[in-house]
Image (tube, rainbow, N blue to C red):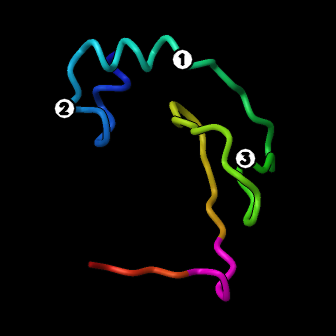
């Protein structure tokens, strides 16, 4: 629970919500150069990086950023 409380998106959640999320989590170890998301494919999981490194690569022609 301490790890999830340290994340900006869950730090203010009630404890019962965090416990519910914890019940759904499954530890995953990814190998070097493993692609977890690829442009154009549906997202089926969300990953919380507890340790290690992740690289995010955007294709410049596909990158759209908007602010409201």
Tell whether label 2 touches label 1 (CB within 8 Å). no
Tell whether label 1 touches label 3 (CB within 8 Å). no
Q: Nearer the viewer, residue 51 or 66?
A: 66
Q: CA distance from mark 3 to mark 2?
A: 27 Å
Residue 57 relative to residue 12: left or right: right
- Considering every residue shown, the one lying at the far bottom of the view is 61
Q: Which residue is mark 1?
A: 24
Q: Residues within 10 Å of mark 3 (few under 14, many from 20)?
A: few
Quarter holding the N terminus? top left
Q: Which residue is mark 3?
A: 36
Q: CA distance from mark 1 to mark 2?
A: 19 Å
Q: Residue at 69% of width from left, 25% of height from top? A: 28
Question: Which mark is first along the chain, 2 or 1?
Answer: 2
Q: Which residue is mark 2?
A: 12
The secondary element bearing badge 3 is classed as loop
Q: Residues within 10 Å of mark 2 (few under 14, many from 20)?
A: few
Image: magenta residue range? 58-63
Vertically, is 5 above or below 61?
A: above
Q: Is residue 37 magenta?
A: no
Q: Residues within 10 Å of mark 1 (few under 14, many from 20)?
A: few
Vertically, is 3 above or below 32?
A: above
**Residue 40 numbered tag:** none
Residue 50 relative to residue 56: left or right: left
């Amino acid at each position: 629970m301490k790890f999830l409380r340290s994340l900006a998106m869950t730090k203010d959640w009630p404890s019962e919500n965090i416990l519910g999320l914890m019940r759904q989590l499954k530890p995953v170890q990814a190998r070097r150069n493993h692609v977890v998301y690829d442009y154009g494919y549906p997202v089926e999981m969300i990953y919380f990086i507890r340790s290690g490194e992740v690289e995010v690569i955007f294709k410049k022609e596909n990158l759209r950023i908007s602010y409201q």
